[in-house]
Image: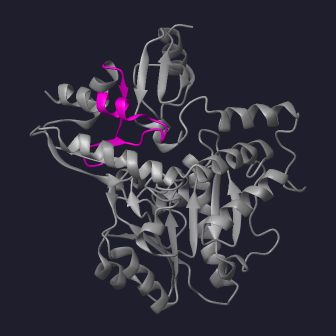
Amino acid sequence: MTLSDIKALDSAHFLGVFGERCPVCFTRGEGATLYDQDGKAYTDLFAGIAVNALGYNHPAVTGALVAQAQTGILHTSNLYYVAPQAELAALLCEHTFADRVFFSNSGAEANEGAMKLARKYFYAQGSARYKIISADHSFHGRTLATVAATGHDYYQAPYRPLLPQGLTQVPYNDLDALRAAIDEETAAVLLEPMQGEGGVTPASPDYLAAVRALCDELGILLILDEVQTGVCRTGSLYCYEQYGVVPDILTSAKGLGCGFPIGAVLASEKVASAIAPGDHGSTFGGNTLACAVSLSAMRYMIGHDFSAVAREKGAHLMAALKTIRSDKIVEVRGMGMLIGVQLTQDCSAAALSRELLARGFVAGTAAGNVLRLAPPLVITEAEMDAFAAALTDALK
């Protein structure tokens, strides 16, 4: 089919949640390069929204996917033991704070599971605590519960009254506002260590530590949403490590499967012990194929220290971006390989990303008129330098 054929089918039959998409259909990939139907090459600096950490056609991903598929077992259900599920859970516990892991199919499902776990933790104690406080400009998913936790009015407005009750937002990086919002019914605080969709805005250096201390003082739980910041993306396996803060619950997805859908809830034994059989579950979550792919990818990234790779390459990309002399750039910020280029209001990030696409470079956007970059961690310095040059020209 031609691109016009695909667009016509999409327009006629697909639910219009994505509107007019970027005018390209990728048909294959290799490394950090994507190819469209006409064979045109594009250097990818967005990785499917921070998903394809190992880029395209990496043997740790495709090899595991093919090998598992050839066994004939893609799914058997959680009524039975699943070997790669058990191994992946053990690997995540070995390399994080967590004692227990539950697998879902997406980041939104992981965040739903985290909120359920927080509420069940207090319910099991006979406590009335149920409220969860998140941050303005946050993004936690598209389900009804995660929309209620997402701090953007334009996401929430069509779905009011919001469900479930008890989810509120306060300004990010504002400890006083958080303290003022907490009451005797507050169960947990849910934060991203760096807001991705909200503008690629890191937590200030002392903020997360102060939030952790506040949660400890008041006996409530800290949930960190690391769906976008996790899996080496920001320069450590999970971003919380760089803040010296240990959460009670953490959510992961995106890079966890390097392109294959999988999410995870990680929790300490103290919190996880509140869960009893039947309290939560999933038909597809933690299926054999997803866990086999994730296990292979995670072993590869941990074994090859991709946290250091993200730090080094992120520093190179950040430096290249900061050398660009343009009055359209207000600020370049981020951590590791999750970087935001804040633009002036007269320079549309969406229009700039389209201009870059026409020049053969894939970039994303975020709220607040930000060009968002989350490249595959296998991207080369030469490819990043070529992108910086293309961005310089596009800004002109």
Residue at 56 percent of width and 66 percent of height: 250
Q: How far across and how far down the image is residue 84, in percent?
A: 79, 51
Q: Nearer the viewer, residue 38 or 106?
A: 38
Left or right of 84: which side holds 48?
A: left
Q: Is residue 344 visible?
A: no
- Which region of the structure is painted magenta? 359-386
Q: How far across and how far down the image is residue 320, in percent?
A: 25, 40
Q: Quadrant of residue 394?
A: top left
Q: Quadrant of the C terminus?
A: top left
Q: Nearer the viewer, residue 307 or 126?
A: 307
Q: How far across and how far down the image is residue 245, in percent?
A: 46, 75
Residue at 25 percent of width and 45 percent of height: 319
Q: In the image as oriented, which residue stretches furthest toward the right?
A: 80
Magenta residue check for 364: yes
98 versus 75 height, above or below:
below
Left or right of 36: which side holds 316?
A: left
Q: How many marks?
A: 0
Left or right of 138: which side holds 359?
A: left
Magenta residue check for 118: no
Q: Is residue 212 visible?
A: yes
Residue at 85 percent of width and 30 percent of height: 70
